[in-house]
């Protein structure tokens, strides 16, 4: 156009390409939400679209113009770096109006000089625009290239005086120099920024489909997260996916995505930066987050804050992190920078990581410091940081535990020094491998002059890796520790035992060393005290002191109240719940177990790091309440958790499986399950006498169920003597063997008060009742049964009565004063019989197991053959069919059915099947 050629101040023709609206690319995704935002913005005077290179700014405006959504004609000008002189800029603006056929009065004129513009021209232009019959939209794409404040001031003048006829759309990587604060205060600006320009997962899927791809939901999510919705990155990935044979694998591969956009980011972003900025970006690429001070430490300069601030303003793929002083790069851009670091200065990586580790350690970012020390392959320094900063406990609990474990899992074995051995021990313990932890601790032998941090870390890990330590005679054991919790009888801290001193108590050693530490420093590490109490509870439990163990676990819960201790809190809940369940404290056990399961979900504990003890506790609670179906369900959930390294939990799982098998009449299977528990050095005996004792008592119960008291006594002889549960089991075996006197003597030797847990006390009371019934004193036997019911009912303990045998049914049926007991034991409503709900003597009222829908109690176990007959009856077989199926006579089947009716307290086959299903027998 000849007319336009005369408008350039230099006399050169204007470049018409700058007036052309960019073409909308193929496979374009029309994003209605952004089109609507732009349409809304064009109702006012100013719309600003800013974002990094390739964010889709220009494409959005071009597609909006193509969709004819503007309130009037659109005048487009692409501003380039050579348009930064005021005269040149305004010449192109006037040329754009003429190019897009928006007539302006001839009197407006044109700039006469490239370097400046007469203000009268700006006034004439504003006046001319104000007189237009309809609004006109002026799109200035790339306004940041002007870089001259005078142009922004003149543009602001025109916009302010052109009235509603001018709608200005500014597109750029940085904010224009206009007084945006004033436009915001007057609600006269619409801003579309990087966050809005980012593709959503739905838009990503649509873009990929437009490129002929059929992405999975996982691929869409991976690409959207990796690119953070960056339009150019997504389009480049889509084009690369079209050329690959495995588009799904490409979508899941970070490296493939990075390769697809590397050239673009290098040319459009990195190469456009000054040399000092490039150096800072490449050196700080080793960081996930960048602080100006840390950037200065890595570059050796002091321009970090200025450069990072400018990169943010320039939308150069660097953004601030919230209201902090930290910044981060776009992940794809960061990987491009790391690639440049590897290619330009491959030897610089380790020194940079080491320098970053020192800076981060000095600014209380310990986990980050350890990560960079590990990246520098400086494992002695990394391990030293963990130990010297008293952070070994944070490898076991807290928000950084999984990250620290992952870091130290990569540490080579056999590194010399105490700190690496302690770090390896802590890492093994975090994986649940106590045996490996003990092995590493054996290599940690600090000298007498070792730092207190080393001694405390070693003592704490000893307590946690070897809960059976100190269980011998004298004052070294955990029972002594229980009584000396606040006393002064403590082992010399850090001292290895001499040949005649015995094994020191790790708990006492930990407390002694903690007393020597600065209290303020310990206050910053609450996980140490929580872990100590947890370790003490485990030691007490392994030694068979379950009551004291429960107290220790409860104390650990009191100490585990913040985010640094949530892992140990979770494990305490599981340990406490299982200990309570075994003792018959069913309501407390259920509460703590459910709290533990909730904590695991809330804190996102990985499945392979979860304890089975919460589910085991719930299984034990259900079994003791007589709900075998729920018990089996919870037990299956527990067995889905890793049990191989938690021998006490594995032993308890075996005990529960054995109880369920025995309840279903499968005595051989019940014994087989118990034989599967390891008995090697890492088996129940190694885990303490408690686990071995539980297995022995379970074997005794199976043999008694089979009518073999001799085998029952032999099974108990395999366990170390001691503990009320073993005593009561021995009394039951003696009674079954006909040795009533010895049975009475054993029961008489039980301690009084709360030292015998409810589950054991109820069984002891029932044995006393059985002995009395055998002697013919029915009234006294009934009174003793009533005592047992009063002990059991507040906890919902039904299993001791289920497992008591047929003698109990006779006592219950003949004693007129046991109506309340019969109502509760049969699962009927509390008011179904006279006096129901009263007589507990503790004012506890009803609770779990007391309701109308409670599982009916069986006071005599079904035999294996009776279970077989009942299963056939449940399949609607006739008596003749059952006889043929089981190779029995019809009369034998009828005899079994009558026995089943009697034991289940029913009179018809359908009722027997229904009640058996409710009890978990079918």
Image (tube, helix red, strand yellow):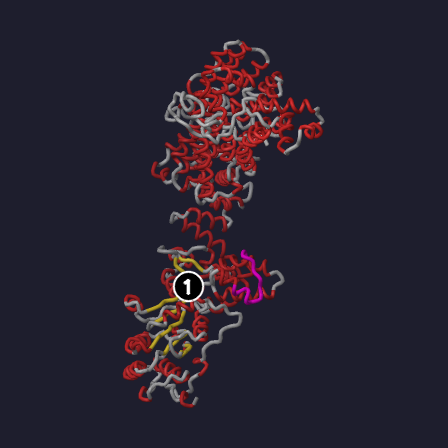
Front residue (pair 724, 423): 724
Front residue (pair 544, 388): 544
- The residue lying at 44 percent from left, 18 percent from top is 787
**In the rendered view of the protein, which quadrant contains the C terminus?**
top right
Number of disc labels:
1
> Mark 1 — residue?
196
Residue 109 place in picture, x, y as percent: 33, 87
Residue 813 visible at all:
yes
Question: Which range of residues does the magenta coloring cover?
Answer: 206-218
Residue 392 visible at all:
no
Q: Quadrant of residue 734?
A: top right
Instruction: Sort mark 1 into few (<14), some (14-19) or many (20+) by Cα contacts within 10 Å.
Output: some
| Residue 297: in magenta span | no
**In the rendered view of the protein, which quadrant contains the N terminus?**
bottom left
* Residue 612 versus residue 694 in the image, above or below: below
| Residue 212: in magenta span | yes
* Residue 275 versus residue 679 in the image, above or below: below
Horizontally, residue 756 falls left or right of residue 710, namely left
Label 1 residue SS = helix
Front residue (pair 332, 670): 670
* Residue 606 versus residue 672 in the image, above or below: below
Residue 526 place in picture, x, y as percent: 39, 38
Residue 601 place in picture, x, y as percent: 47, 43
Hey, which residue is sitting farthest bottom in the picture?
A: 2
Horizontally, residue 920 falls left or right of residue 514, namely right
Q: Quadrant of residue 307?
A: bottom left
- The residue lying at 37 percent from left, 56 percent from top is 322
Residue 355 place in picture, x, y as percent: 44, 53
């Amino acid at each position: 156009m000849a007319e336009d050629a005369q408008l350039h101040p230099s006399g050169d023709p204007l470049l018409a390409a700058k007036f052309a609206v960019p073409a909308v690319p193929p496979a374009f995704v029309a994003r209605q939400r952004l089109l609507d935002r732009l349409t809304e913005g064009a109702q006012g005077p100013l719309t600003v679209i800013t974002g990094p290179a390739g964010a889709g700014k220009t494409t959005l405006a071009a597609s909006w113009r193509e969709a004819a959504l503007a309130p009037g004609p659109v005048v487009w000008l692409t501003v380039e770096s050579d348009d930064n002189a005021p005269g040149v800029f305004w010449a192109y603006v006037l040329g754009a109006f003429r190019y897009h056929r928006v007539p302006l009065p001839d009197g407006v004129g044109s700039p006469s000089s490239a370097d400046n513009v007469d203000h009268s021209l700006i006034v004439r232009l504003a006046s001319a625009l104000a007189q237009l019959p309809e609004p006109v939209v002026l799109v200035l794409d790339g306004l940041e290239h002007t870089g001259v404040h005078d142009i922004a001031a003149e543009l602001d003048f025109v916009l302010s005086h052109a009235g509603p006829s001018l709608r200005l759309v500014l597109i750029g990587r940085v904010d224009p120099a206009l007084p945006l604060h004033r436009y915001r205060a007057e609600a006269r600006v619409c801003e579309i920024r990087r966050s809005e320009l980012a593709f959503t997962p739905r838009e990503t899927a649509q873009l990929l489909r437009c490129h002929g791809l059929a992405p999975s939901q996982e691929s869409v999510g991976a690409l959207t997260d990796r690119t953070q919705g960056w339009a150019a990155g997504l389009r480049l990935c889509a084009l690369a996916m079209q050329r690959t044979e495995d588009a799904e694998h490409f979508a899941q591969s970070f490296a493939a995505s990075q390769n697809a956009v590397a050239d673009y980011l290098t040319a459009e972003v990195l190469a456009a930066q000054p040399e000092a900025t490039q150096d800072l970006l490449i050196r700080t690429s080793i960081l996930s987050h960048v602080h100006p001070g840390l950037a200065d430490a890595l570059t050796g300069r002091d321009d970090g804050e200025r450069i990072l601030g400018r990169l943010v303003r320039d939308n150069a793929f660097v953004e601030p992190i919230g209201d902090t002083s930290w910044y981060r790069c776009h992940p794809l851009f960061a990987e491009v920078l790391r690639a440049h670091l590897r290619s330009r200065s491959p030897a610089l990586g380790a020194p940079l990581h080491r320098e970053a580790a020192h800076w981060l350690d000095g600014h209380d970012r310990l986990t980050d410091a350890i990560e960079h020390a590990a990246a520098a392959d400086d494992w002695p320094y990394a391990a030293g940081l963990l130990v010297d900063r008293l952070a070994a406990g944070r490898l076991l609990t807290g928000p950084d535990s999984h990250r620290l474990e992952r870091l130290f899992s990569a540490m080579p074995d056999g590194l010399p020094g105490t700190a690496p051995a302690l770090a390896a021990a802590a890492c093994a313990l975090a994986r649940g491998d106590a045996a490996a932890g003990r092995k590493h601790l054996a290599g940690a032998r600090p000298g007498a002059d070792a730092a207190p941090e080393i001694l405390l870390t070693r003592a704490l890990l000893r307590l946690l890796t070897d809960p059976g330590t100190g269980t011998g005679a004298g004052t070294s054991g955990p029972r002594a520790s229980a009584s000396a919790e606040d006393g002064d009888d403590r082992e010399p801290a850090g001292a290895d035992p001499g040949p005649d001193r015995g094994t020191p108590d790790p708990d006492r050693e930990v407390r002694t060393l903690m007393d020597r530490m600065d209290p303020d420093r310990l206050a910053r590490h609450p996980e140490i005290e929580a872990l100590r109490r947890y370790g003490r509870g485990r030691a007490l439990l392994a030694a068979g002191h379950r009551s004291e163990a429960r107290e220790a676990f409860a104390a650990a819960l009191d100490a585990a109240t913040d985010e640094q201790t949530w892992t140990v809190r979770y494990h305490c809940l599981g340990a406490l719940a299982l200990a309570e369940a075994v003792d018959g404290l069913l309501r407390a056990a259920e509460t703590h177990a459910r709290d533990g399961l909730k904590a695991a979900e809330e804190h996102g504990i990985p499945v392979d790091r979860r304890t089975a003890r919460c589910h085991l506790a719930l299984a034990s609670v259900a079994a003791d309440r007589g709900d075998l179906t729920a018990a089996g369900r919870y037990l299956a959930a527990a067995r889905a958790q890793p049990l191989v390294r938690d021998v006490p939990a594995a032993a308890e799982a075996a005990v529960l499986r054995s109880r369920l098998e025995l309840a279903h009449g499968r005595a051989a299977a019940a014994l087989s399950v118990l034989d599967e528990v390891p008995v090697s050095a890492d088996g129940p005996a190694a885990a303490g006498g408690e686990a071995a004792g539980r297995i022995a008592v379970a074997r005794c119960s199976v043999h008694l169920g089979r009518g073999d008291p001799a085998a029952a006594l032999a099974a108990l002889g395999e366990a170390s003597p001691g503990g009320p549960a073993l005593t009561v089991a021995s009394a039951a075996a003696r009674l079954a063997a006909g040795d009533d006197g010895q049975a009475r003597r054993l029961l008489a030797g039980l301690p009084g008060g709360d030292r015998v847990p409810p589950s054991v006390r109820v069984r002891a009371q029932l044995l006393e009742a059985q002995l009395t019934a055998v002697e013919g004193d029915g009234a006294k036997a009934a009174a003793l049964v009533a005592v047992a019911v009063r002990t059991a009912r507040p906890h919902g303990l039904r299993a001791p009565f289920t497992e008591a045998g047929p003698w109990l049914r006779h006592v219950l049926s003949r004693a007129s004063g046991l109506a309340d007991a019969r109502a509760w034991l049969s699962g009927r409503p509390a008011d179904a019989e006279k006096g129901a709900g009263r007589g507990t003597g503790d004012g506890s009222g009803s609770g779990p197991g007391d309701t109308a829908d409670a599982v009916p109690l069986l006071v005599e176990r079904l035999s294996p053959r009776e279970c077989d007959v009942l299963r056939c009856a449940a399949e609607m077989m006739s008596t003749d069919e059952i006889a043929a199926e089981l190779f029995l006579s019809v009369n034998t089947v009828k005899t079994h059915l009558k026995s089943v009716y009697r034991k289940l307290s029913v009179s018809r086959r359908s009722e027997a099947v229904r009640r058996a299903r409710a009890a978990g027998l079918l």
